[in-house]
Amino acid sequence: AGGGGVHHICDRGGETLSEFLARAAELGPERARELVEMGAIYHLPREQFEVFSAAFENKERARSEKPSNYRRPARVVDAGFTLAEGDYVRVHARPKTYPRAREVDWAQRVLHQTEHFLVVDKPSGVPAHATRDNLYENTLEQLKLMFAGEAWGRELRLPHRLDVDTSGILVVAKSGEVAGQISNSIKAGFALKRYAAAVQRDQTRAQDDRLASGTVLEHYQLRQKHVPHTFVDKTTEEGAKQCLLELEDVQLISDDEANVSVRLITGRTHQIRGQLAAIGWPIQGDELYARPSAEEGFIDSPQLCLRALRISFELYGTEYDFAVPSSYNF
């Protein structure tokens, strides 16, 4: 198990997926069905698996020269799906769960609705979209379930994303076409994205004077497959991505704590978290980029104190601007 799952090759054609999992993966029938329904099982037919496998014998070449019949393993949610001998099956036997997704009153989380999109206040601790091993416990899927009776209910798409532990404003498009238009507006720099964060000084480092209102932080995110990412001031490394953000307002609470309003200029994975940690002021509750041990003076927080406050974008010639309440209510 684990992040990449356990890989199996079907050695007996004609079995259903649940039968194969119970036998080859040594899972009970009930557990096998649970994993299938959760979206933790992937499949690829034998002939496509041979192409998939060959493409990764040379990973560098595979990035730019995938054959036309190349396919990735697809998620299977039908326990009665029939396998053929030689088929590839990937099993995530211990999927990460997000029970809060089923506890939230999603109707109360919808702040605004137009004919083209929804605006939602995403809670902390819930993914914005499906994860590799969990199809249903996320914001997008819960909204699809809530609006299942609408013609556009199953067509909901995300034009942008928030980290699992980041709360706040999230736009959900009612079609792929609208999602693409909003995403292009964001990428073209027409969008404005503001965040609020509660930060704490890293007492193991020298004081950094860059935590000040009006400062534009520039770092480079090094190319890495896994998180946490590395953010550096300068680099000559190929593939490093420039990261820019503005500290619009810094309110010092004490020598070791501050509330910060951030304007995101570029949009990289974990950018705000990584850049603030890189100047010695990690976000409270950040278990990836801070060191939360009490003896080092870090503040114990049950969740990441980062909230998406505001987003503006253009769609079909109209400018939209939305904000969530409670700036520092994480």
Image (cartoon, rainbow, N blue to C red):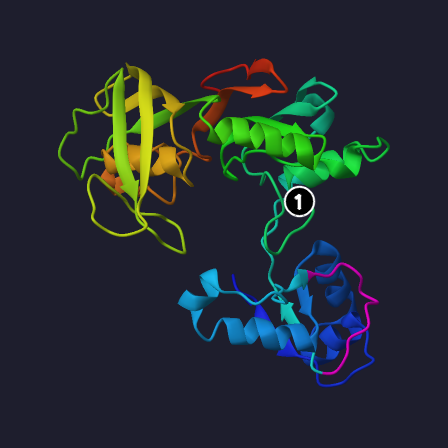
Crowdedness near tag 1: few (<14), some (14–19) or many (≥20) residues, C-alpha within 10 Å? many
Q: Quadrant of residue 298?
A: top left
Q: Is residue 264 magenta?
A: no
Residue at horizontal 40%, vertical 39%? 270
Q: Quadrant of residue 33?
A: bottom right
Please say whether residue 282 is visible from this viewpoint.
no
Where's residue 157, x and y in %? 66, 36
Depth check: give the residue in front, 165 or 184: 184
Please name the predominant secondary structure of the magenta segment in the image. Answer: loop
Residue 159, compared with residue 213, is above or below; it is below
Residue 10, compared with residue 196, is above or below; it is below
Where's residue 327, x and y in %? 47, 16
Tag 1: residue type?
Glu
State the SS at label 1: loop
Q: Which residues are magenta?
A: 75-85
Q: Is residue 77 magenta?
A: yes
Residue at horizontal 58%, vertical 71%? 52
Residue 86, compared with residue 136, is above or below; it is below
Where's residue 131, x and y in %? 59, 50
Circle count:
1
Please say whether residue 138 is visible from this viewpoint.
yes
Where's residue 72, x and y in %? 61, 63
Q: Quadrant of residue 255?
A: top left
Residue 119, compared with residue 14, is above or below; it is above
**Image quadrant for the N terminus?**
bottom right
State the residue lying farthest toward the right: 149
Give the residue at mark 1. Answer: 137
